[in-house]
Amino acid sequence: MRKGEPVPKALALCKVLDRRGREIELASFWAKGPTLLAFLRHFGCLCLSAQMTELVPRLFDLHRLGLRTVFIGNGPPHLIDTFIERFLLVDKPVEVVTDPSLASFRAAGLARSPWATFGPKSVWDAIRAIGGGHINRWGQGDNLQQGGIVLVDAAGRVAWYHRNLSIGDYPPSVEIVDAAIRLVLKRAPLPI
């Protein structure tokens, strides 16, 4: 995916599941305005826990910028509520869905491999996360699937894209908010 290009049709047409197992087409999220799609590793990943610790406090900033934020996991739908409770998302401006089929992850061009999960970089990522007090909870999705971020503008074009290459290769939340600010400034010209 490239900045400024339309979201690939294969991704736009992908269906994700809500907590009740109902299907939602991904394009429906950005049909109402700019949307941040945060593709997550499995719901119990220790590096995902580290990422959430950094990203959750910025959810209100993203909301104030006019962005809809959607977290896309890959575990079964019944784990969404546990994930929401674990990261205290009940009162946050975020939607959590899942794609156990991994179709949306593939359509977004996200990595899925043993090397990305168990290679030297990921071992270091895991050690760093454990040092930060994060723990792994196995069996909450596909352990080999990596995450990523796709920021989509209201016209369905890619405004920003990050593809995680290892379990801890998520972008800092400040980069995500900066990308959102650039999108907002591009949409609303400054007064002269």
Image (tube, grey):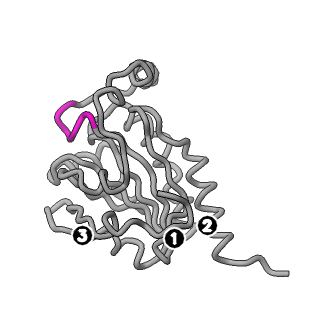
Residue 89 coordinates in the image, percent (x, y): 36, 53
Q: Indicate the position of residue 97 as horizontal and vertical percent values.
A: 27, 58
Local secondary structure at mark 1: loop
**Do labels 3 and 1 touch, CB within 8 Å?**
no
Amino acid at dot 2: Leu
The residue positioned 31% from the left and 34% from the top of the image is 45
Q: Residues within 10 Å of mark 1 (few under 14, many from 20)?
A: many
The residue lying furthest to the right in this view is 192
Task: Compare marks 2 and 1 and give the one earlier in the sequence.
Answer: 1
Q: How many marks?
A: 3
The label number, if any, that marks residue 183 in the structure image: 2
Residue in view at x 63 percent, y 69 percent: 184
Magenta span: helix, strand or loop, mainly?
A: loop
Numbered badge on residue 24: 3
Q: Is there a contact, CB below 8 Å, between mark 2 and mark 1?
A: yes
Report which residue position mark 1 lands on.
Answer: 153
Q: Residues within 10 Å of mark 3 (few under 14, many from 20)?
A: some
Determine whether, in the image, residue 171 is placed left or right of residue 108. Answer: right
Q: Give, as a single range, the part of the protein colored magenta.
A: 138-144
Q: Which of marks 3 and 2 precedes in the sequence?
A: 3
Report the side of 109 relative to 104 (left or right): right
Please check the rendered image and state whether residue 127 is part of the magenta-colored stretch, yes or no: no
Comparing 53 with 4, the one in front is 4
Disc 2 from disc 1: Cα separation: 7 Å
Residue 143 highlighted magenta (yes or no): yes
Position of 191 relative to 144 (above/below): below
User: Disc 3 marks which amino acid?
Assistant: Ile
Q: Secondary structure at mark 3?
A: strand
Residue drawn at x 37%, y 27% is 134
Spatial separation of the CA atoms under disc 2 and disc 3:
25 Å
